[in-house]
Image: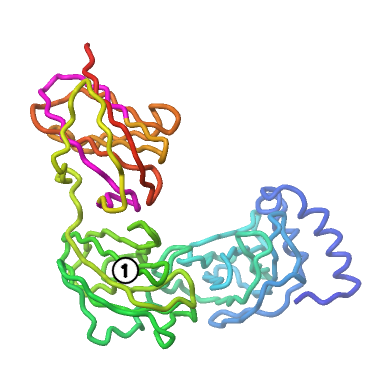
């Protein structure tokens, strides 16, 4: 931490006057001289690593982020890599010093939310390495490492979950298979990655190119589902994708191997039974119409319910059959006073579904369509929000020209 003495008070006054200016001014034009005024809290050395902590007693940048400076002796022509690593905040790193006409800075080049700068000293002298954060007034512990060459970076993105936290979870013989339903329970003795919510891991064998949908359901807690495995750069996660506080993840396996499916909860204290189901992904082109057939020129009524299948992101869907010929033009209107309408049309000649949210006005949907081929099309009634249900009306009119 910066000591409170007379010189530092002077530095604080200068910093307050300059750092309250624009961020661009700090980080580009006058950044080197300003950051060089920060008192170094310690010395860095090539091949070494130090620990520090951002706190409310540190100076703040123009972005209102805390900063701590360290000294690093450099020799002209020498190249080094500086890594700022923290699991407590999104790291932001600065380097200033002799021969630098512009401040070096970085956000996430170290992988995850870690920062990395690789550079060559242009002159001999003492350089300032400044640890900071991307967000305002973030605090926490960090490490600064200086190496003579870049090492490996974290293999997941900023904001993602470290796959290593899941790989240590025991499977204890729990396996999942496509088409089967498995049961388990979170208890007070369940494993808790990073001290968080209880979690149980299951193994799922995958083949490259194969697609599956995994659904986690529980009446005892708000389900949270995680999947990691070979070829996945980040841990896949979902909270309410299956609606009703249940979770769902659809994935295509990028490689052969054993994937880890983790059943967990949103609340850290949650316990209780759950089920895991693995199925082939739903093809909305084959969504059952259950004898619902559209009468052109008429108005059909229906009820989107919790018994309808999930078609994506927690949204349920109900399909109607529309018989048509190539060249026919239809206007399709979906209206409801009970949910925000979301309308889809799939069928022969369409590579992708036609979709609409609010073109009908007042949260209603409208699609005007020219049929590309003869055949049976599916008009799918859904909601814009997860888990929304209620009564609706569907009207299809044939148009000219």
Residue 112 drawn at (x, y percent): 46, 66
Could you say which is closer to the camera, residue 381 or residue 26? Answer: 381
Which quarter shows the N terminus?
Answer: bottom right
Residue 91 drawn at (x, y percent): 57, 66
**Residue 151 in magenta?**
no
Residue 143 drawn at (x, y percent): 58, 77
The correct choice, above or below, for 400 with respect to 102 in the image is above
Q: Residue at x 78, y 74 (%)?
A: 2
336 left or right of 70?
Answer: left
Q: Residue at x 53, y 71 (%)?
A: 83
- Count residues near mark 1 (Cα–Cα under 10 Å), then give few for <14, some for 14-19, many for 20+: many
**Which quadrant holds residue 93?**
bottom right
Which quarter shows the C terminus?
Answer: top left
264 left or right of 175?
Answer: right
Could you say which is closer to the camera, residue 1 or residue 37? Answer: 1
Predominant SS along the magenta part: strand
Disc 1 marks which residue?
Answer: 227
Q: Residue at x 22, y 62 (%)?
A: 254
Q: Give the image's coloring scheme.
A: rainbow
Residue 278 visible from this viewpoint: yes
The correct choice, above or below, for 245 with respect to 331 in the image is below
**Residue 328 in magenta?**
yes
Could you say which is closer to the camera, residue 21 or residue 303? Answer: 303
Could you say which is closer to the camera, residue 170 or residue 123? Answer: 170
Residue 274 drawn at (x, y percent): 32, 73
Q: In the orientation shown, which residue stands out farthest toward the right?
A: 6
**Which quadrant holds residue 3?**
bottom right
Q: Residue at x 65, y 66 (%)?
A: 138
Q: In the orientation shown, which residue stands out farthest toward the left?
A: 374
Which residues lie in the magenta part? 309-333
238 left or right of 277?
Answer: right
Residue 97 visible from this viewpoint: no
């Amino acid at each position: 931490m910066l000591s409170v003495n007379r010189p530092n008070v002077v530095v604080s006054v200068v910093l307050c006057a300059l750092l309250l200016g624009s961020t661009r001014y700090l980080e580009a034009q006058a950044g080197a001289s300003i950051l060089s005024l920060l008192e170094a809290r310690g010395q860095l050395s090539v091949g070494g690593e130090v620990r520090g902590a951002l706190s409310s007693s540190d100076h703040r940048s123009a972005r209102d982020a805390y900063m701590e400076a360290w000294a690093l002796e450099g020799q002209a022509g020498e190249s080094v890599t500086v890594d700022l690593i923290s699991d407590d905040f999104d790291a932001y790193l600065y380097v200033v010093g002799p021969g630098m006409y512009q401040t070096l800075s970085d956000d996430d080049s170290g992988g995850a939310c870690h920062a990395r700068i690789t550079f060559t000293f242009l002159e001999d002298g003492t350089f300032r390495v400044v640890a900071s954060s991307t967000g305002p007034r973030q605090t926490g512990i960090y490490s600064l490492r200086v190496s003579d060459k870049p090492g490996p970076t974290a293999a997941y993105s900023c904001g993602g979950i470290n796959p290593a936290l899941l790989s240590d979870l025991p499977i204890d013989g729990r396996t999942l298979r496509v088409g089967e339903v498995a049961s388990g329970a979170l208890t007070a003795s369940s494993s808790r990655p990073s001290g968080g919510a209880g979690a149980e891991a299951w193994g799922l064998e995958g083949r490259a190119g194969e697609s599956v949908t995994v659904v986690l359901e529980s009446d005892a807690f708000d389900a949270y589902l995680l999947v990691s495995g070979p070829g996945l750069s980040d841990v896949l996660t979902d909270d309410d994708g299956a609606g009703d506080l249940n979770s769902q993840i659809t994935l295509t396996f990028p490689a052969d191997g054993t994937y880890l499916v983790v059943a967990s909860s949103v609340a850290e204290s949650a316990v209780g039974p759950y089920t895991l189901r693995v199925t082939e992904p739903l093809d909305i082109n084959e969504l059952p119409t259950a004898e619902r057939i559209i009468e052109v020129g008429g108005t059909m009524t229906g009820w989107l319910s919790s018994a309808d299948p999930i078609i994506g992101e927690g949204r349920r869907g109900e399909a109607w059959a529309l018989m048509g010929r190539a060249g026919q033009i239809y206007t399709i209107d979906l209206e409801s006073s009970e949910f925000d309408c979301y309308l889809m049309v799939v069928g022969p000649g369409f590579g992708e579904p036609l979709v609409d949210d609010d073109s009908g006005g007042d949260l209603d949907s409208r699609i005007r369509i020219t049929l590309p081929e003869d055949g049976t099309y599916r008009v799918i009634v859904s909601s814009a929000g997860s888990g929304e249900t209620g009564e609706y009306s569907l009207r299809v009119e044939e148009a000219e020209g």
